Amino acid sequence: MVERVLELRVHGVSNTPPQQLLGLTPEPGGTGPQPWLVAGGAVTGFYRSTAARPDDPVAVEAYSWGQLTSGARTARDVERALWTVLLPFTLANVALYARPGIPADPDRERWGSRSGITAWLIRLFCLSLTATLVVSVTGIGVDLIAWQCVDRGCLAQLPGPWEFLADGWWREGTRALAAGLLLPLALLVLLGLVTWRTYQYEAEMPARPRSAGRDAEPEAEPAANPLQDPTFWCGEGQLRRAAVLHLCTGAVAAAAVPLAAVILMDPPRGGRAAVAWPTVAVLGTVLVIAVVAVGRPYLSRRAGDTPLGPWSLAVAALTGLGLAGTFLLLLLPDGPAGPPLTDLRPPVGCTLDADIAGCGADRSLPGYDGMVAWLASYQVLLLMAIGAVARSGRRGLLPPVLAGLLLAPAVTWLERGLPGLPPAPDGLAAWMFAVPALAVAGTGLLLPPTRDDGDHQPLGPRTGIAWGRRGPALIAGFGWLLAIAYCAGLLSWVTDRLDGGTGPHGGPAVRPPEPVLWAGLACVVALLALGGVALRAGMLFHTLRRREYARLARHADGLSAHDLRRCRDVARFRALHRLVGDHGVRLIGCHATVSAVLVTLSCAAALSRDRPAVAPATGWWGALDRVADVGDSMLAWLPLVIAGVGLLVYRNDTVRRTVGVFWDVGTFWPRAAHPLAPPSYAERAVPELQTRIAGLLGLAPNDPSRMDGVILSGHSQGAVICAAVLFQLPSRWRRHTWFFSYGCQLTRLYGRVFPAYFGPERLRVLATALTPPAGYVAWTNFWRDTDPLGWPVDAGERDVPVADPEALHPSGGEVADPPIRNHSGYPEAVEFRRERAVVARLLRRAVPSPRERVG
């Protein structure tokens, strides 16, 4: 029987259709070979050409997984586009995998280690990020609608029958707040339902076919990479428990807004105290459990399909009890301790006549502005702690903790005084404490890095760990900035919508929280900084292009004008290759540094409780006010713009190639830190590829579908998926497999940002795993110097440079110039076909002979 080898091709982020993966070209009249589904289904499937024959020595098969993140133009596209709105949760989840120093065996990670503390801090940050979204929506329902919007004209601007909140019974006390609290709780229910529908991703497990005529199953290999964990791509139980914890924490954050306002305005006594303080205790218990639980193996280990457990049920029960107490307190009449709560709300009629007494005052919900400002400030301290510990270990935790312990008492002493201390002198402001405290916390990011046993020399130039080991903080920080932008834009948009019912002589119906105004100002500055980084990138690109053109046109005497023009085209792609590979990470770090300074100043301003513009809207203050308004208007449209881009990613190949790489990098990783993030496509793709490879190699010798060897061929992001498959594949199947990677980012992107999985030592582990007893490394990497997303690996594999273009001018009777393929068309290259022929001969041998390594 003919020994057969299968080349299994896995596409990248561009969702290359199966016919292109298989190299099928239509013939005149629309006839010709077509892709044929041989395994899988419409979402993920394995395809072969209808022209393929059973006796072909090398069969080509395409695995299409792009429908998991893109797909046909159906209503499901819109649903998937809405996942992009949860991009902040995605970035926070990705930060967990950017930690350096993660042990190869997850069971060996201890809470007190550098990676363990960083993981705990990241999970705490993810909890706070959920709270940020919920607190913002609570501000809409409780503050803007239920508290400030007292006129029927204001309430009429909202869709739905909200006018009942202007009636007498609902206007008494805090009963309207109970109705407003339903809005964030409805959001949590929606998030829970959407997340619950995606658990089938985590439930996917590879099949373990029995071997027929193959080697016996060897003993389990010692773990040398976290990707070898059998449950890495299966964490359904962990996800369910984490989702319960996040949803309960969000419910506690939502209840805390009206509950804190009631306690501040009307200190509870008597029967109200019997409801209020037990409710506070129950909600506080939920928060304590959440803070402790995110550091326990109960939530930090992926253990496949495991039950929720008693702790999850207890947290859910306590949360329900706390919400019941909150609603009961809000529906009770006013207590005797404070003034009538109705007098603290904006007077009725301000939307029609701004001269009514009290209309010019800020009557926003007491305590809400401060809650938003303090939440943002301590999130910044948490991000600094994440970066400091990831870089310097436990010693990096001291500056942020010290700053956090001193900041709150200092601002409290300034605003209200502290027992045993004299009053704060006049002239002090909260920003005078906030800026030094945040600066002290930032010193932790400058401590010398801590080296561990996993630190090794980079594989090549510019392949060291990105951003000085502060990658987790930088990635999570960008997610936080995006979340703040979303929330500020949403609050600003609702405020403008409610103010639409204002009469010609009326004042604003509602006022947004003060931090929202500072967020608008910061948005404009951040965009200017981003423009500066883009300008710097453009200058670098121009310089690199000139250098590459000079190198190509060095022998200009022998080149025609046509060839020189082609040299300019090639130089452009080579310059882009160098810009992305050599300078991309550094440029992102520059923008992150500017953003960190901007965030520090914005938090200090928010804690000062001052608006960007004071009463006289002239001069500099007036300019700041107008800039803040422009920024708020831009933020109001940001969620819709992000969702629109997400929809184009699924529908437009050009947009997908441009921005899809970031989305597919983010959704590659499992939801081990933030359970409300979009699902990971790799949790389905990796097990399916394992099952397919093992199933074909494990067939009986006389089975016509049996394969004697597999060339696992991955392009771009597909190469990363293939690497994850090979880490999971048992050695008895791996020794019959050869890895082709091309256009891959294993060194310049994944290796730098995720060093614990694809760093220098961990990539050498993959090369060692692909080294059979014969001694050669069963891994070939193809790259082009015109490919902006493909580079050499240098981890022990064979690197093959691919010429691009094949020539500067047409030849052989062709009239069109040979195309510059940059990131596509690797399988059509001469170098690829030549290497595949040699590898196929090696895999067909019973005992492959060593092969000399070149390149």
Image (cartoon, grey):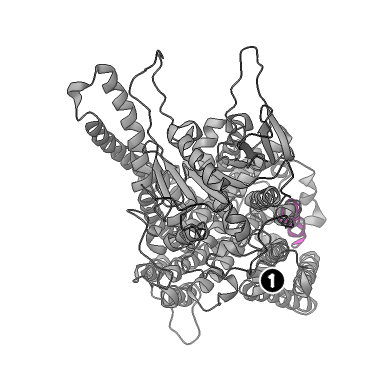
User: Number of numbered discs present?
Assistant: 1
215 left or right of 489 in image: right
Q: Residue at x 55, y 40 (%)?
A: 13
**Quadrant (top left/top right/bottom left/bottom right) for the N terminus:** top right
Relative depth, front residue between 362 and 176: 176
Relative depth, front residue between 74 and 205: 205
Q: Residue at x 57, y 58 (%)?
A: 727
Position of 26 relative to 360 (above/below): above
Q: In the image, what residue type sits under mark 1?
A: Asp
- Predominant SS of the magenta segment: helix
Residue 226 in picture, x, y percent from top left: 56, 65
26 left or right of 719 in image: right
Relative depth, front residue between 459 and 582: 459
Residue 828 in picture, x, y percent from top left: 49, 31
- Rendering quarter of residue 808: top left
Residue for badge 1: 266
Relative depth, front residue between 360 and 116: 116
Q: Give the range drawn in magenta.
A: 172-194
Q: Residue at x 40, y 37 (%)?
A: 802
Residue 851 in picture, x, y percent from top left: 43, 50
In the image, farthest residue toward the bottom: 420
| SS category of the residue bearing label 1 | loop
Residue 133 in picture, x, y percent from top left: 62, 56
Does the magenta segment cover residue 401? no
Please rate how many residues cluster around mark 1, counting C-alpha atoms within 10 Å: few if below 14, some from 14 to 19, many from 20. Answer: some
